[in-house]
Image (spheres, rainbow, N blue to C red):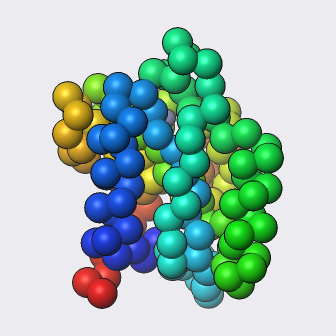
Amino acid sequence: MIATTRQQLAEIRRHGERDYPFECCGLLLGNFEEEGRKVVVETYPISNAREEEAKRNRFLIQPEELLRGEKYAREKKLDVIGFYHSHPDSPAVPSQYDLEHAWPTYSSIIVAVNDERSEDLWSWEMEADRSRFNKEEFVVETS
Ligand SMILES: [Zn+2]
């Protein structure tokens, strides 16, 4: 389960709309709590590192960007608890590429952006054996 705020979800949606028709991506920074619960404290936008023509279909976070994000998180006493990205003109469901490039434990928030407007937004968590993603329950706090 992952806890977020309305403001964080709005930031992810805005990032997805801004980068349309390309995929946006970013980190979810926060805390791992007991019983697999995660709490997002901040979103950390990252530009999409791929070549222009590949940007539409796949996201990639370059290692140095991830390191920078991790360093920033450490300074704020937070962890990287997941990733978010957008799916321009396709459903908010993980692709085969996403399955091959994700890790268990982390959350993957995906927002569908159709025609510059963000629509479905779901969080996914990978099965421990990496065979598939399961939809993750998310709680939206009002603060
Ligand atoms: Zn994807």
Image spot of residue 85 (x, y percent): 47, 44
Lateral position of residue 63 relative to residue 131, left or right: right
Instruction: In the rendered view, tell whether residue 75 sits above or below residue 118.
Output: below
Lateral position of residue 113 relative to residue 128, left or right: left
Q: How many marks?
A: 0
Q: What is the quadrant of residue 60 in the picture?
A: top right
The residue under the point 49% across, 30% down is 95
Image spot of residue 29 (x, y percent): 59, 69
Residue placed most toward the observer, 60 or 135: 60
Lateral position of residue 22 relative to residue 46, left or right: left
On-image quarter of the C terminus: bottom left
The residue under the point 45% across, 21% down is 56
The residue under the point 71% across, 69% down is 72
Image spot of residue 131 (x, y percent): 63, 40
Instruction: In the rendered view, tell whether residue 11 sits above or below residue 139.
Output: above
Residue placed most toward the observer, 77 or 39: 77
Q: What is the quadrant of residue 71 in the picture?
A: bottom right
Image spot of residue 114 (x, y percent): 22, 31
Q: Residue furthest top?
A: 53
Instruction: In the rendered view, tell whether residue 59 sits above or below residue 75.
Output: above
Question: Could one spot residue 81 in this view of the protein?
Answer: yes
Question: Could one spot residue 138 in this view of the protein?
Answer: no
